[in-house]
Image: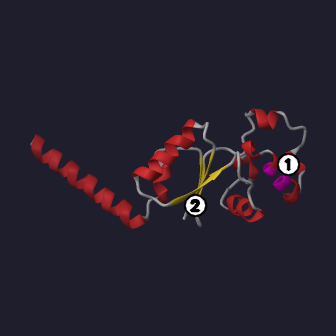
Amino acid sequence: MIKFYFTTSSGSCRKAKAWLLKNNLPFEEINLKTTRLTKEELLHILSLTQNGTHEIISKGGKAYKSLSVDLEQMTLNELFDVLNQNRLLLKRPLLVDEDRLLIGYNEDDIRKFIPRHIRRIHKAQIDLQLSQEILQYN
């Protein structure tokens, strides 16, 4: 199942949620303002990144700028504590399942959460529609 880490104030989070609902994908909502991450969740998210914390931490936000710590020098346990005290350090939305991670909302990239067999059906429908339109113009 997809875990959807969000904040209610984020437009990108609202778009991602609407997309999940539109595509009838089951997901678990985790509000970052009210819910603490478990170490297992954080480790799983980090395991799906290519560049570790660089990908999931928003260094442009107020939460990061107000910190007076060097995240690069922290142990994993220290990082876990800092992230749970400052969950808005995380980029949003985060969509996570067993094998995939999406950071932020991207209309093309979010499609990877649609099961492969359904993506094939959608592609076949699009191909058929294009073929019919070409025939109409000829």
Estimate the x, y position of residue 67 in percent, counting from the top left.
86, 38
| Dot 1: element | helix
Give the mark count. 2
Separation (CA) of disc 1 from disc 2: 24 Å
Q: Which badge, 1 or 2, comes first in the chain's sequence? A: 1
137 relative position to 130: left or right? left
Horizontal side, residue 21 vs residue 36: left or right: left
Q: Amino acid at mark 1?
A: Glu
Q: Residue at x 60, y 41 (%)?
A: 8
The quarter of the displayed image where residue 122 is located: bottom left
Vertical order, 45 against 89 (above or below): below
Mark 1 crowd level (few <14, some 14–19, many ≥20, 10 Å Cα): few
Q: Residue at x 44, y 52 (%)?
A: 21
Q: Quadrant of residue 36?
A: bottom right
Q: Disc number at residue 130? A: none
Q: Nearer the viewer, residue 81 or 52?
A: 81
Quarter in which the C terminus is drawn: top left
Quadrant where the N terminus sits is: bottom right
| Residue at image coords 73%, 59% | 42
Magenta extent: 79-84
* Disc 2 residue type (three-letter): Arg
Magenta region, mostly helix, strand or loop?
A: helix
- Extreme residue toward the front, this view: 34
> x and y percent of residue 71 in the render?
85, 47
Tag 2, which secondary structure? loop
Q: Is residue 61 magenta?
A: no
Return the residue at label 2: 100
Image location of residue 25, percent across then percent down: 45, 59
**Label 1 belongs to which residue?**
72
